[in-house]
Image (cartoon, grey):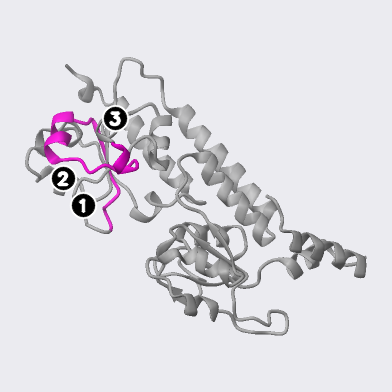
Amino acid sequence: MIKSLRLSVALTLGLVAAPLLSAASARAATSPSCIVSLSPTATETLFAIGAGPQVQAVDTDSDYPTTGLPKKRINALEPNVEAIVGICKATMSHPSTKPDLVIISYDANDIQQKLTGLGIKVIDQGAPTNLAGAYAQITQLGALTGHSAKAATIVAGLKTAVAKDVASVPAHPKKVLTVYYELDPTYYSLTSDTFVGSLLKSLGVVNIADAKNTSADAGYPQLSAEYIVGANPKLIFLADTICCHVNQAAVAKRTGFSSVSAVLHHHVVGLNDDIASRWGPRLDILMNQLTAGVKAALADAALWQK
């Protein structure tokens, strides 16, 4: 990623003034020591690449890793500028209470413009639409925090894992595997133009939400129960098992759903809400679950009987 002019000059001056300064020391001297993450995905990534000690505050939805997260919390949906500006402890090495770096995934209350106006570096890492975008965000955080090598290792591992999953799905030209992906019990779904939708598409399935998407939906249309039942998906993924306690039994009790192929043949797969809604270092877990569901459906002879 492109370094700022200030960072480049600082590195150069540091090497000139102290030619024996190690690369690690130079990195520590120029990397941000006070980071605020207002994105659960960014939080996971920062800790995975080794930048955890640099993170001084996170948003209220950040819950992974399960240990080591800072106690300072900020509501990313209603961020308070004053709270963010005073988040850091002033020290000799960091005389300002302003964070060196703030990462957001949603620009609530025009927080990016407000913080930038105060001289604070803000990076917007909204949800990507494909794997390349997710990998680019991990790489960017590595470059910004001084942990490029670890970030590169994580990206390489994810690429290998995803490629392995995709290659493991048998060719199925005569089997049209229709899929319904549920975001919440009101039938919001996602299309192939979204990040998770792109993962499903790579596995060779037909997403029933694609046909109902409009420009106003931005890839997340709200379907109707009647449409879903009529589409008769052979596979259902539930990304609302934690928030809303939805499972196969609950789906089967919905009007008309007991006759849906996925329900009849027990191909309703419950996902972890958090993993399913993020695109960071645990995306290989999501991909593995999606792949397992697809392979199980393709291998079930009863599902394909005419």
| Callout 1 secondary element | loop
Specify the label residue 251 is tagged with. 2
Image position of 247 with respect to 106: above or below: above
Sequence-wise, the earlier of marks 1 and 3 is 1
Asked if residue 221 lies in the magenta stretch, the reply is: yes
Q: Amino acid at mark 2?
A: Val
Image position of 126 with respect to 269: above or below: below
As drawn, is 67 to the left or to the right of 218? right
Specify the label residue 162 is tagged with. none
Q: Are marks 1 and 2 in contact (CB under 8 Å)?
A: yes
Residue holding disc 1: 246
Q: Quadrant of residue 306?
A: top left
Crowd class of label 2 (few under 14; some 14 to 19; many from 20; radius 10 Å):
some
Q: Is residue 53 visible?
A: no
Residue holding disc 3: 297
Q: Which residues are magenta?
A: 214-242
As drawn, is 141 to the left or to the right of 230? right
| Callout 3 secondary element | helix
Q: Of circles 3 and 2, which is in front?
A: 2
Q: Of circles 1 and 3, which is in front?
A: 1
* Foreground residue among 90 and 232: 90
Sequence-wise, the earlier of marks 3 and 2 is 2
Label 1, label 2: how far apart the Cα atoms are: 7 Å
Image position of 214 with respect to 60: above or below: above
Sequence-wise, the earlier of marks 1 and 2 is 1
What percent of the width, then of the height, locates residue 302?
20, 24
